[in-house]
Image (cartoon, grey):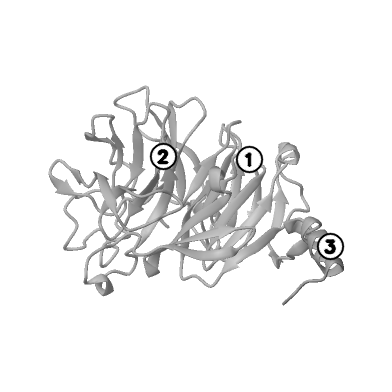
Amino acid sequence: MKLTFISYILVIAFSCNTPPESEQMKYETIGIVERLDADLDAIIDSTAVAEIIAEGFEWSEGPVWVESEQMLLFSDVPTNTIYKWTAEKGNEVYLRPSGYTGEDVEKLKEPGSNGLLLDNAGNLVLCQHGNRQIARMEAPLLQPKPAFLTLTDQYNDKRLNSPNDAVYNKADELFFTDPPYGLPTQRDDDPEKEIPFNGVYKVKQNGETILLTDKISKPNGIALFPDGQRLLIGNSDPKAADWYVLDLADTAATPKLFYSATNARNGLPGLPDGLKIDSNGIVYASGPGGIWIFNSDGKVLGKVKLDNAASNVALSTDEKTLYITNSGKVLRVRLK
């Protein structure tokens, strides 16, 4: 088609005046904010809602915001897939397979990757349920492929259960949780389970994997407080729906209760699962009924209440946006 001079000018004018995403796309919204403390007002507006930015998944998990590419990566664990979301293109398949590279994938209920994170060099690191390891993707972020380097897959010469979530400290040490959810039966008595407990571990700079604690029944989400000396761990056990703090300065530390939601479940969907902590020590944790927001002392400031179970969260680099994996959906909530 041949453009006239006038139509060419019109095309250029239109392209130069394309409205920003907020004006182009109107997302369906869900959820409400429950304000339980005045300190919440500095974090999120009480009238905020969650935008549904992607949906149609079996069980979305492990979101991570990649600032350099302005994209959100997240796992769909049952389908062995990582998806990418951007404001420009929406949702796209990013990597498949993501967590299990064997042939008999049908034996596993949740074979895919779960927690995703970036190491200090900007590489994608995956908690791989099916492969029962934590691995680094050996490919550029914009040219993903299922080529993986194992970072850890054993403790005391026994295979890990199924690493679930992880976090790096500034010294490039990796901390992770290892519940049984990637095993064929997802139970502690699974015949393929080699380690008799569900541990929280550290991978040292030399690659050695050491046990931090075996005293949390179903360790799941994990994050570091800004001081780098305290780990917060969510316990996805219906009988002990709690969050615990582990003091890394004490080599013989016993997990201390941060907050218990065991008696607050009341039929609400979800358990303590994934979580993130911002630079001010504010905790955003998936739990019964949605996302719980705590201060660093374990005081509940408020909640983002949702009808379906939330599995995990991610923060944008500027900490002004909270992304939530919410059963078959991915949500976005604006923060202050």
User: Residue most toward the right?
Assistant: 6
Location of the C terminus (image quadrant): top right
Residue at horizontal 78 percent and vertical 59 percent from the top: 18
Which kind of residue does numbered mark 3 sit on?
Ile
Q: For residue 38, which quarter of the picture?
A: top right
Q: Residue tagged by mark 2?
A: 167
The Cα–Cα distance between marks 3 and 2, rounded to whole angstroms, is 51 Å
Image mark for residue 319: 1
Q: Is residue 220 left or right of residue 163?
A: right
Foreground residue, 308 or 27?
27
Mark 3 residue element: helix
Which kind of residue does numbered mark 2 sit on?
Val
Of marks 3 and 2, which one's residue comes earlier in the chain?
Answer: 3
Task: Give the vertical position of 253 relative to 78 (above or below).
Answer: above
Of marks 3 and 1, which one's residue comes earlier in the chain?
Answer: 3
The x, y position of residue 181, in whole percent, is 33, 60
Q: Residues within 10 Å of mark 3 (few under 14, many from 20)?
A: few
Disc 3 versus disc 1: nearer the observer: 3
The Cα–Cα distance between marks 1 and 2, rounded to whole angstroms, is 17 Å
The x, y position of residue 287, in whole percent, is 53, 53
Image mark for residue 9: 3
Which kind of residue does numbered mark 1 sit on?
Glu
The x, y position of residue 6, in whole percent, is 87, 67
Q: Residues within 10 Å of mark 1 (few under 14, many from 20)?
A: some
Let me know if residue 267 appears in the view: no
Disc 3 versus disc 2: nearer the observer: 3
